[in-house]
């Protein structure tokens, strides 16, 4: 059964109110509902911390999206082709909360900057 907008909004807002921060990470192999995947490592890569209340507004119509630019450190080595992004509950290790596969893998090489414009990271019930 799909969630109603009411329940989806409640669940998304639960994350916003119970997780002060989430960390956005990048994958070169997609995770799944059990976790997994291959997260980028090395080359100055680090997950980006986001204040959930400041970056993600209250959910509406079963979704919310980032309202500020999300920028990763400049790569100092190749990170490979980024296939997915994920939201974590910790800066390292931790639990993967949700993820999204990019429509087209994005290669990140030495000296490249990876960023997501406002509205490009959408948390939704799908």
Image: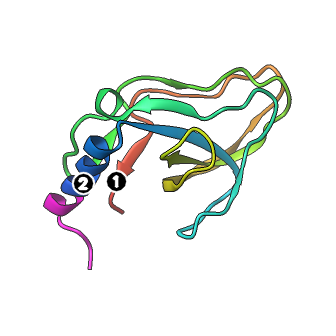
Note whether 102 is above or below 47 in the view shown. below
Residue at the spot of label 2: 62
Q: Are marks 1 and 2 in contact (CB under 8 Å)?
A: yes
Q: Residue furthest left?
A: 6
Q: Which mark is residue 101?
A: none
Q: Position of residue 35 (x, y in %)?
A: 59, 64
Magenta highlight on residue 7: yes
Residue at the spot of label 1: 124
Magenta stretch bounds: 1-8
How crowded is the residue under tag 2: few (<14 C-alpha within 10 Å), some, or many (20+)? many
Q: Position of residue 109 (x, y in %)?
A: 82, 30
* Foreground of the two, 39 or 63: 39
The secondary element bearing badge 1 is classed as strand
- Quick one: label 1 or label 2, which is nearer the N terminus? 2
Q: How many marks?
A: 2
The secondary element bearing badge 2 is classed as loop
Q: Residue at x 68, y 22 (%)?
A: 113
């Amino acid at each position: 059964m799909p969630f109603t907008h009411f329940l989806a909004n409640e669940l998304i807002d639960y994350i916003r109110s119970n997780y002060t921060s989430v960390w956005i990470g990048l994958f070169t192999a997609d995770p799944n509902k059990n976790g997994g995947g291959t997260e980028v490592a090395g080359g100055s890569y680090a997950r980006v911390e986001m204040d959930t209340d400041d970056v993600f507004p209250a959910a509406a119509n079963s979704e919310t999206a980032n309202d500020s630019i999300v920028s990763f450190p400049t790569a100092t080595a190749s990170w490979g082709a980024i296939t997915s992004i994920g939201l974590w509950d910790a800066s390292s290790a931790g639990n993967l909360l949700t993820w999204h596969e990019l429509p087209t893998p994005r290669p990140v090489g030495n000296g490249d900057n990876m960023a997501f414009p406002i509205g490009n990271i959408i948390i939704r019930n799908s």
